[in-house]
Amino acid sequence: MNILRLIIVLFALFLFQPNGSNAQVKKIDNKALIQFSGVIIDIDSLQPIPFANVIIRTERRGTVADYYGFFSFVAMKGDTIDFINIGYKPASYVIPDSLVENRYSIIQAMIRDTINLKEAVVYPWPSKEDFKRAFIELKVPDDDIVRAQHNLMMAQRKDIQDNVSYDGSINFKFTEYQRQTSLYSAGQMYQQNIFNPLAWASFIKAWKDGAYKKKDTDSKN
């Protein structure tokens, strides 16, 4: 049993013993790491380019510049950095491998990549012949009065009113009105004007003023 325990201890020490070569490589990598920062600008206007991609080519990792074109991330000496942004030609920069400091900053300029497209004219007709036929067959009223009378026809207005649904704003106002009414009368009966003293006061005042008297139409005739 003691021999087995000794073997297990020796195996554990061998397994978790730090490797000298790996420690040395890690130490060298730490010395090669730098804080790489900079600002990305337009080469013509010298204005910052926001939200450009900054990527280490060999590792496919990096960061995104902020609204002012500033970026900062950890890289290694000798890395090739790619700058990519829509509307600009890709740019690259190689970090010098002879740096002494662990910080390095640059101002990266990018050139606009302008693409001129041909003019596109959109027509509601497939061809000029279809447009010509539609234009000839178009029935236009004679003058403004005829068009105005046509638009003011009661039958047509009623047909439009019956067939056209409410838009979003009207539906929203109606829904909000119902919601406010339900919240105002929550836990009680809905308000009835017959029990409203203000409504009764308005009714009595109108009655005294003669608003409900029958008008004598014969005298007018």
Image (cartoon, rainbow, N blue to C red):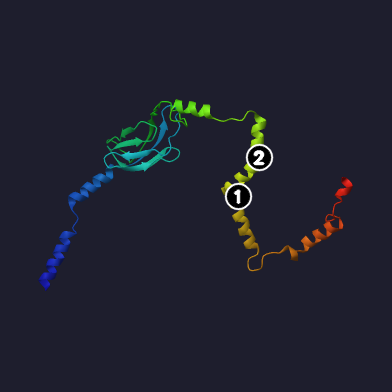
Say which residue appears at 31% left-offset and 37% top-offset.
Answer: 81
Q: Disc 1 designates what residue? A: 170
x, y (%) of residue 194? 75, 64
Q: Which is nearer the eye, 190 or 166?
A: 166
Is residue 59 shown left or right of residue 184? left
Say which residue appears at 46% left-offset and 28% top-offset.
Answer: 130
Question: As displayed, is residue 117 above or below residue 163?
Answer: above
Q: Which is nearer the eye, 214 or 56?
A: 214
Say which residue appears at 17% left-offset and 63% top-offset.
Answer: 12
Extreme residue in the left direction: 3
Mark 1 neighbour class, 10 Å CA radius: few under 14, some 14 to 19, many 20 or more: few
x, y (%) of residue 84? 35, 36
Question: As displayed, is residue 114 above or below residue 210?
Answer: above
Tell me how far mark 1 sits from mark 2, CA to CA.
24 Å
Residue 130 shows up from this direction: yes
Is residue 119 shown left or right of residue 170? left
Q: Disc 2 designates what residue? A: 153
The amino acid at mark 2 is: Met
Q: Which is nearer the eye, 76 or 173?
A: 173
The amino acid at mark 1 is: Ile
Quadrant into which the N terminus falls: bottom left
Is residue 26 shown left or right of residue 152? left
Say which residue appears at 18% left-offset and 53% top-offset.
Answer: 19
